[in-house]
Amino acid sequence: MKAHPMVGDSLLAAVFALLDLLIFAIATISHAQAATPAPKPWYISIPLIIGAVLPLVFRRRYPVLSAYLVLLIGIPHSVLQLGLASLAGFCVAIYTLVVYVSRKHALFYALANVAVMAVQLPIQTNNPAELIIGVLAGSASLAISWVLGEFVGARRAYQAEVEARLHMLETERDQQAKIAVAAERARIARELHDVVAHAVSVIVVQADGAALTVATQPDLAERAVKTISSTGREALTELRRLLGVLRAEEADEERTPQPGAKSLAELAERVRAVGLPVRLEIEGVVDDLPAGVGLGIYRIVQEALTNSLKHAGPGASALVRLERTTDRVYLSVSDDGLTGRRALVGLAGGNGLIGMRERAHVFGGTLRAGPQPGGGWRVQAVLPFGNA
């Protein structure tokens, strides 16, 4: 009904029309069986009954027009006493104006109905009791419709405000995520810059050594040239990655030697020292991985273990598993901590997860993070390497 409001309004109008048609049919049957006053002709009654409720079908799309059509058609309907559709339409129109338009329009409409009632009731009856009943019924209908409209209108306004705030929070979260991505890319670029600078320094030193020993120690010079070749290829690979990352200009930042995959044992030992038991499993040789890939692995493990320290809870332990194949590295960091709290971190899209994903994406890899079926949290990454 909310998706198609005219369907609900059409059903409401149909119910009011059927009630009046039922009243008209009963009056017709009663007149045929007994000496009761004859009802109005069907070619007058039925069009007025349908016309009194038809504007309700489009009351939400054109609330003001619908309300005054109900008032206009309701005058002959109520004068001829054809049923309750005119009173019901008046109540629905008041409610609609309060909810969808404004109190000012609703007040003008209510005053117009009171004026019509003040003229119409004395014409329809001279009985004081009937006059009092008519006034009370009209006043009660007005009050109930107005209060109901105020309640629904306030709820709609509250929902609209909540939706606006949620939209604002989503926008702010997206902006923070973009800022976090930019900051992480800048950090990765700075680290890759250091890796390339180190490779170039190695090339220069090896070239100088080869130049000094080429005549006296050709074997040593040949090894130096081979080192220059392999280091140069590695530097080119890292340089390509560096060019794909936006590097923020930050002056006077301290430069420190960058860790790699071979530093994972030291990292695990430091994490154990602060209270989280960590088991490290490494399959294959990881000491000769490209420096950028090794640095990416180290940072992903570092961030994942930091999250475990923050969210896994007391008594938890972690497992870091690293497997190297011919052209890629498979990494898994898992813990057996509190699933509920960790799930909130994943859904929130924290900066730590953003940073780990950026690390993997820089090397053309993938990263997944989420709760484990048996409890705890797991981060899985695949990082390809080579001269791509």
Image (cartoon, rainbow, N blue to C red):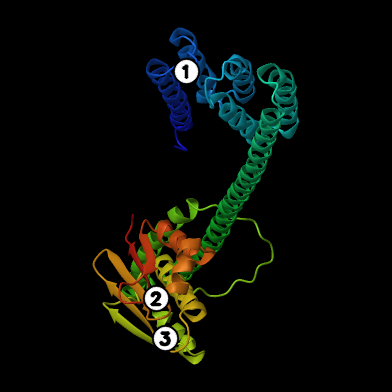
Q: Which mark is first along the chain, 3 or 2? A: 2
Q: Amino acid at mark 1?
A: Thr
Which quadrant does the C terminus fall into? Answer: bottom left
Q: Which residue is mark 1?
A: 36
* 310, above or below 90, in the image: below
Q: Which residue is mark 2?
A: 261
Q: Amino acid at mark 2?
A: Ala
Q: Which residue is mark 3?
A: 316
Residue 10 in the figure: left or right of residue 110: left
Residue 187 in the figure: left or right of residue 114: left
Structural crowding at the residue carrying mark 3, measured as other residues with C-alpha within 10 Å and reported as few (<14), some (14–19) or many (≥20): some
**So how many labels did they put on this image?**
3
Q: Residue at x 55, y 56 (%)?
A: 177
Please tell me which residue lies in front, 57 or 199: 57
Q: Position of residue 219 (x, y in %)?
A: 31, 75
Distance between the Cα atoms at labels 1 and 2? Answer: 101 Å
Q: Amino acid at mark 3?
A: Ala
Q: Which mark is first along the chain, 2 or 1? A: 1
Q: Position of residue 133 (x, y in %)?
A: 67, 33
Structural crowding at the residue carrying mark 2, measured as other residues with C-alpha within 10 Å and reported as few (<14), some (14–19) or many (≥20): many
Q: Are marks 3 and 1 in contact (CB under 8 Å)?
A: no
Q: Residue at x 41, y 23 (%)?
A: 26
Q: Residue at x 70, y 28 (%)?
A: 131
Q: Residue furthest front?
A: 35
